[in-house]
Amino acid sequence: MEKNMKRSKEKKSKKKLWLWIVGSLLAIFLIFIGTAYFTIQKTMNKINTPLIQTTDAAQPEEKTVIKKDPFSVLMLGVDERKDDSGRSDTMIVITVNPEKQTMKMLSIPRDTRTEIVGHDTVDKINHAYAFGGVPMAVDTVENFLNIPIDYYVFINMEGFLQIIDTLGGVTIDNDMDLTFDDYHYPKGEITLDGNEALIFSRIRYEDPRGDFGRQIRQRQIIEAVMKKASTPSTLLKATDMLNVLGDNVRMNFSVKDLIQLQGIYKKMDKDIEQLSFEEGEGERINRIWYYIPNEAELQKIQTDLQNHLKK
């Protein structure tokens, strides 16, 4: 067994990536309010998907964001390719306490070995989505962290990158010369279409930084999308962009919730407290590599999140 020193860096990079993803989603919706209200409402009707959990016979009422009530969000980034149900490449839990004006963010290592609730197996936590979709992923994370999950945000990253073609491509500053099959990405400023950006975001083994390097590139792409989406000319492409979002994003936030959420976030300390697993170890079981959390650290994280969700 050995600790993987790169995981801490990867986690930080993923957290930053998700902040940009969520920020870009909110920015796009807010930019188009008033200019494409009907399209926004139509898209939100498609995106808004109530969470039907797999373990309880009597389902609780859907929660609504209230200015003073603490709540939690599970963010799932899935690389869902054609003819493949996909696995959650990224799993991040955010807890928000509006009254205390604080937020905590925890990145769960995707190879974490835990019980898959509703599947009667012990496996990698990111397999929960492949076995039972968002509901099973939510149930499994709730069980693992011993906290309720009120909301989820699901993004199919492959489809989400289609928005780049709608924008007419994006320009980034590539920090490393990379080649993958017939695709060459020279060092320096490069402009990418949607397919080129997708390949660029997936490169891992050709980069000596491994998954950490991949996360850097993903963040660069999201930042570039954010920058271009905020330009006035983008308003002319509002309908096409919202259609892409409608096909690739699912959440149980309503429009009202998002507006409330924006108001809450404005008042928050932008230095979100980052929680992370650092004491666990890698272990091969039946020739499969797992991340085994340290029990004492897991209990500490559970208690921290539980206390944060109290009024």
Image (cartoon, helix red, strand yellow):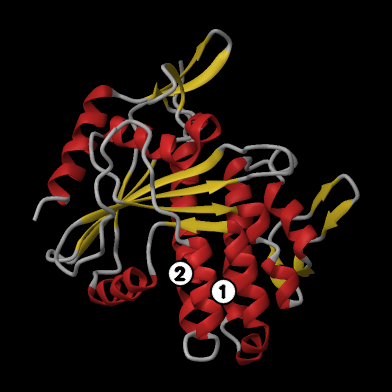
Q: Earlier in the sequence, mark 2 or mark 1?
A: 2
The numbered disc on residue 283 is none
- In the image, residue 84 lies at what x, y percent? 68, 37
Circle 1 — which element?
A: helix
The quadrant holding residue 230 is bottom right
Give the amino acid type for the residue marked by disc 1 in the picture: Met
Give the amino acid type for the residue marked by disc 2 in the picture: Gly
Q: Residues within 10 Å of mark 2 (few under 14, many from 20)?
A: some
Report which residue position mark 1 lands on.
226
Which residue occupies the extreme top position in the image? Answer: 286
Residue 40 in sight here: yes
The quadrant holding residue 276 is top left
Q: Residue at x 33, y 74 (%)?
A: 262
Residue 32 in sight here: no
- In the image, residue 100 lies at what x, y percent? 13, 64
Circle 2 — which element?
A: helix
The answer to whether marks 2 and 1 mark residues whose Cβ atoms lie closer than 8 Å is: yes
Which residue occupies the extreme front position in the image? Answer: 58
Q: Is residue 113 above or below residue 215?
A: above
Which of 281/26 is in front? Answer: 26
Q: Is residue 291 left or right of residue 293?
A: right
Q: CA distance from mark 2 to mark 1?
A: 8 Å
Report which residue position mark 2 lands on.
23
- In the image, residue 157 lies at what x, y percent? 61, 53
Pick the quarter of the image with the C terminus: bottom left
